Image: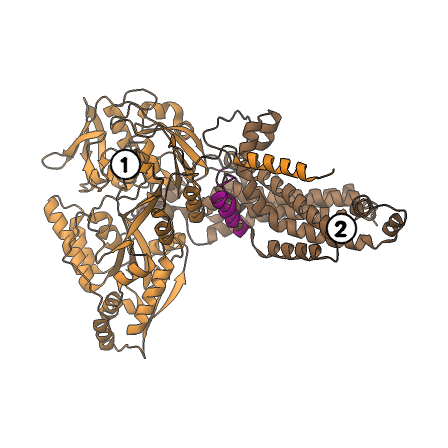
Amino acid sequence: MLRAVVLRLVTTAITLIGVAVIVFVVIRVVPGNPIALMLPPGATEEDVARLTALYGLDKSLPAQFLIWVQGVVQGDFGTSITARQPVLDLVLGRLPATLELSVMALVIACLLGGVAALTGTRRRDTKVEGAIDVANGMALSVPDFLWGLILILAFGVLIPVFHISGRVTPSLDLPFATNFYLFESLLRLRFDLWADIVSHMFLPALALAIPLAAIIGQLLKQSLKETMHLDYVTLSRTKGYGENHVILREALPNAVLPTLTLVGVQFTFLIGGTVIIERLFSYEGLGNMAIDAVINRDLPLIQGIVILFAVIFTAVNLIVDLTYAALNPRLRHGG
Amino acid sequence: MNLDRRTLLKLSAATATLGMAGLPARAQAIDELVIAYNVTLPSWDPTVGPSAVNPTIQGLYQSVFDQFILQQPDLSPAPGLLTEWGWNEDKTQVRMTVREGVTWHDGSPFTAEDVAWSLARVANPETGSPIQFVWGTLANHRVEGNTVIADVVQFDPTIFKWMYFLTGYVLPKAYYERVGAEGFEAAPIGTGPYMVDKFERNAFVRLKANPNYWGGKPDFDTVTIKFVTDAAARVAEVESGNSHVTLEMPYEEFDRLKAKMGGVAAPISDIGMIFLNDIEVMTDPNVRMAAALSIDKQTIIDRLLSGYGVKIDTLQTPEYDAYDPSITVPYDPDRAVELLKASGYGPDNPVKFKIQTTRGFKPKDYEMVQAIVGLWRKVGIEAEIEVYEIAKHYELRAADQLAPAAFYNWGNSVGDPTTSTGFAMFGPSPHSVWDGEDLINMIGPLWGEKDEAKRIEGWKAVDRYIAENALVIPLLQYVQPILHAPGVVVTPHASGALLPHLMKRA
């Protein structure tokens, strides 16, 4: 087990180095440099050279990379060209917003998917199961940003019950010490703020959750169906237990394991999906910042965000693998 | 858990209550004006970095900071922090009189020192101002009473126009030196109509009215500007009552909603045009002229932009100083066919070239180019469309590697011909596309022309020459759509800046 962990940590480090090299090179190779965006018409070649030197872009690619790596090792990811703030402060300041949104989306997806799977299993081979399958298919076919637009129209315009932009009402005074607004509002028992934050987060979280809920629902329902035919489940049925008991107490604990693994992997995709959804809902997270950084060719900020995303992805994958190894006896004993 | 009907109803009511917490009521009188803005604000320093030259952000800056000279909604200059300005007799010095009795948002007095320091700061190459090449034409800034004097290193007839253009803002010397660049980003102060109350990057800025504003306290005490970059989301914001004012939405949406709420659509200083590069078939004047004559601009405006646009035939709009209505390029497809025939081309043997365009960067940009390519096809021009990002356009233009034709939009909120025709068409500029020697010789003397009337006439002659030789194809002046709640009266600004202090209660 320990050997496996060390091996995973080494591969994780190599992955991150690879990501760093790729992102550094790619964003400098693709068309559009920040100086060309910055200089107005009328600027001379000397002006181009002056600003290029000012932002350190006049050096060779390896030299720029070396300077950047040296900074990263010391915790300095550079300074954002557009925001003129340290990159690390900017990305860490936004990370909590994106994490809270992703976790809320995950919770909603698990709830919706779980209810769909359990209902489909309970009413298997009926019209209800058919309806759930159709709903799952629709949820999967429509991309999350389109769900976002539908939700904005439905619950922002037609029945305006939720906020459709931002993370919190601007006029509210926030007593928070961290950027984990949702979590901290609960800790401080500020349910007024908590309700306002949830009201802002609910629609983007739901838009992110719907496709994932469909995946969870389908997989869990399939696992439950297979488990329902196993001998021990039949035995519990012959003992006289009701169908609800059989599904929830007997079948579910075994059927849920593959779904849990999937949820872990899908969580990383969920964080990736926040890029578009945050933009659509003007949610002040990392994804929204990433789009601005790309539009403005803010090279240090793009690098910082991509590296942070890579760290999150590899960390979540590592946790999922280790959890799976811990829960699965065959892997735990090296079988 | 037993989920009976009563419990379900209770849960539903609780959910609805939670959802509605804090939602603004659509029909209420407006206490706090909320604007859904189409861009985010990356940085608070209006003089350095990419934000400083982003025209769409200037409205945010002008809410907090004052420019040296005030620009009125019709683009004309007016006394602002400077009450008088001009050159000396031989134009070797500039003299500027500074308004008295103005205070910064922190209560400290605004002085001539602030003006001199602000000018010297952006003239310093180390500051990183993208417009240093303009500000650097003045040097040795000094203060005499409430007058600021500077020596002219190189005469620039537009220097005072830059004082109400990009980066032309006055910053607080003492405060900036005390808090530094980072401190200023965290807590910016200006002399403008609004003070920054709260700023969440990428989310919103909350502004409080400056009670001591020299131009009079604004109508709305509190203004929240939300950064809603998606056009559909912006429309939803005003339709749901979450915001009171928004801008830049599809014209179809504007037409649908303007009767229901309120709307203004006015021309702004932003034009759509097609750069022609002096390469390949574009070196043939017949091809260029045929391309220009075969575009039915008015029909494109009417069909694609719902009529929201003003046809133009030079790079000057009617508000600009060198606008000359006598310069026209008619829609004449028959003449275009004749010209192409003279060069050996026709519908059966079309002249071929590539046209580049953005898609979605400006309203209906790609669709307009599609329509133009369709019109060209009828006269014997076969153009292949290449879609690229705006960043790639800048890079290709700077390297003089644009395709023979390239769609672009050009902003010029000071309306001077130098910052439209000049920068767009002067070959040696890295941002120009046409490099013809004849045009360079015509434009060259105008950069430093001291006689203003002669200078403007010179630019008109340049525009006429460009039109007669089809060296660029101007298409239209854009119209900016603004939707607003019935309780607000919005005054549009021809620069395109949406300014909350120009908004009044209905």
Specify the amino acid type for callout 2. Arg
Q: Residues within 10 Å of mark 1 (few under 14, many from 20)?
A: many
Between B266 and B13, the residue placed more toward the observer is: B13
Residue B226 falls in which quadrant of the image?
top left
For the point 26% across and 32% down, the residue is B119
Which one is nearer the viewer's eye here, B401 or A70?
B401
Give amino acid for label 1: Gly
Along the line of sight, which residue is nearer the eye, A330 or A146? A146
The answer to whether residue A52 is magenta is no
Magenta range: A146-166
Chain A on-screen colour: brown
Residue B350, horizontal then vertical, whole percent? 32, 75
Report the coloring of the rendering: by chain
Query: Split into 4 quadrants, where in the image is the C terminus of chain B?
Result: top left
Where is B413 relative to B21, above or below? below
SS class of the residue under badge 1? loop
Q: Residue furthest top?
A: B108
- Residue A122 numbered tag: 2
Q: Position of residue B210 (x, y in %)?
A: 32, 25
Identify the colour of chain B in the image.
orange
Please, is residue B403 above or below residue B100 in the view?
below
Picture coordinates of residue B296, whole percent (x, y):
26, 64
| Predominant secondary structure, magenta span | helix
Q: Chain of mark 2?
A: A
Q: Is residue B62 left or right of residue A17?
A: left
Q: Position of residue B272 (x, y in %)?
A: 30, 55
Residue with the mark numbered 1:
B168
